[in-house]
Image (spheres, rainbow, N blue to C red):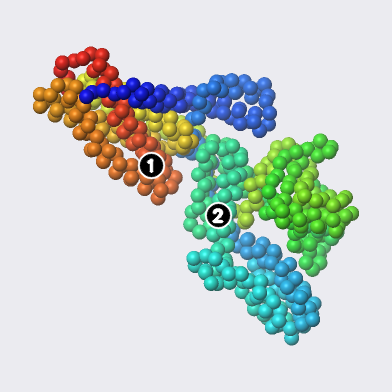
Amino acid sequence: MLYIPMWKRVMIWSLVALGLIFAAPNLFYDRVERHNDAVRTIEAQGPTAELEAERGLWPDWLPSNIVNLGLDLRGGAHLLAEVQVSDVYANRIDALWPEVRDALRDQREAVGNVRRVPSDDPAELRVQISEPAGMPQALEAVRDLARPVFTFTGTGARDLEIRSEGDEIIVTLSAAERTATDDRTMQQSLEIIRRRVDEAGTREPTIQRQGTDRILIQVPGIGSAAELKELIGTTARLTFHHVEGTASSADEPPGPGNILVPSADEPGRYYIMQQSPVVTGEQLVDAQPAFDQNNRPAVNFRFNAQGGRAFGEYTAANIGRPFAIVLDNEVISAPTIQSHIPGGSGIITGRFTVEESTQLAVLLRSGALPAEMIFLEERTVGPELGQDSIDAGQVAAMVALAAVLGFMILSYGLFGIIACVALLFNISMIFALLSVVGATLTLPGIAGIVLTIGMAVDATVLIFERIREELRTAKGPARAIELGFEKALSAILDANITTFITATILFAMGSGPVRGFAVTLGLGILTSVFTAIFVTRTMIVMWFEYRRPRTVAL
């Protein structure tokens, strides 16, 4: 019986209406985008008259999700960076020295005095003992510091290689540990870059690893490659050091175990400090822009439990002495410890502007890049190219749509018009889904939509041809329409399920443009099946109930 219950009709038309509502903001793209930017800025910085005017460009009670435009459509910045993974080896060796020193102190009677000696290789730790006869005990004590490397390639290996030369112990990272360190460094760099770009409010960046030590970064909507480099190019490595004294020249020797670091605010002033930091930025859990007691821009920070304990113990033991806050090998502040600072929180002051304090807080909060990055390739994609791409995509979509509509109307008459209306609903639902899930539309994505337009009528063609066959058996039009939908259903599902599986594989295995194509193709298949099986049938049933025709011309 050619009948659809009222609850099904309400559900079908409700989904269609939601598709139209959520797709509508894309017709007013610039206005909605300015509205969304104003809302985000108001939430972060507070309202102003200008921001409230921008916010009023689109009603708050309407959906404001829009399709994100990719780099090739919107313009933006493209960077290819090489991570200097070898830098991490040197940092790891520096962090290892206090452990080695403490381990050898327990063997002082056998090994004598212990001191670190300079090495030409920054990834090598050289420790000299005053009693060479105690070398076997020293080597055994240092080997106890080695830990297993838990990787697929290095299971069973140790992270340190220890040997001796005369009265010196030489400690280096093993090959298995270097491989594992490289992988951790790349994963950490990817995550930190993603956090920094996301905190800057950029939508849908492409950040992915290429090869063993390279990262591809594509950020739509950002002004230039230089702006992107400024955001992610600094390591923002924060450390807190014990200060031994000051110097007026970079040539002054700092002494064993110490380093000489310039002041960021006072040219010609240098601080002599212990090489091993008291606390590092890796133990930082939060950083927020703020103002100090003199109403100058500053940054509040807070350590985790381990860092807070170390910071508290250090400040309790060094009241009245200065300590240095070092950011990227520059002393940004060297306050004197006035009292014990428990809880692991404090404030960084300096000659900051409000923008600089906000940017520093973002960099510290997102974490320190574990290694320096060298930018091998940088490009700024202008919005004009993106607009040309959008215009070309619109032309292609309109031509494809017109051709499909013309074919359906000429081939199936009134039923063809119904199929065309369903196709328009289908396109609106694709854009609604893209907007809701926050997908990024690229040129390959437009190609997927154009392909969907051509494929969307396949299901209706199958249905209409089955109805034609049933009409030839002299059945009534109601029975022919019902059987046409029933018998075409299995073929429609089989064809679209196999295509959807292909789109899923493309999305899972591909990257960048391939995934953009897979997203629009997959969503297009879902909406096409829905509109063909449910929307088209509902419109035909409503027409049939209204006209009650004795025959159907197909």
Nearer to me, 41 or 484: 484
Q: Position of residue 107 (x, y in %)?
A: 76, 78
In the rendered structure, the answer to whether residue 96 lies left or right of residue 189 reads: right
Tell me the kind of residue under disc 2.
Answer: Gln
Asked whether residue 371 appears in the rendered view, the answer is yes
Mark 2, residue position: 187
**Compared to 293, does 136 lie above or below?**
below
What is the crowding at mark 1: few (fewer than 14 residues within 10 Å), some, or many (at least 20)? many
Q: Position of residue 187 (x, y in %)?
A: 55, 54
User: In the figure, residue 388 lies in which quadrant?
Assistant: top left
Residue for point 61% across, 46% down:
232
**Compared to 504, does 372 lie above or below?**
below
Q: Position of residue 203 (x, y in %)?
A: 54, 37
In the rendered structure, the answer to whether residue 277 lies left or right of residue 200 reads: right
Nearer to me, 553 or 357: 553
Tell me the kind of residue under disc 1.
Answer: Ala
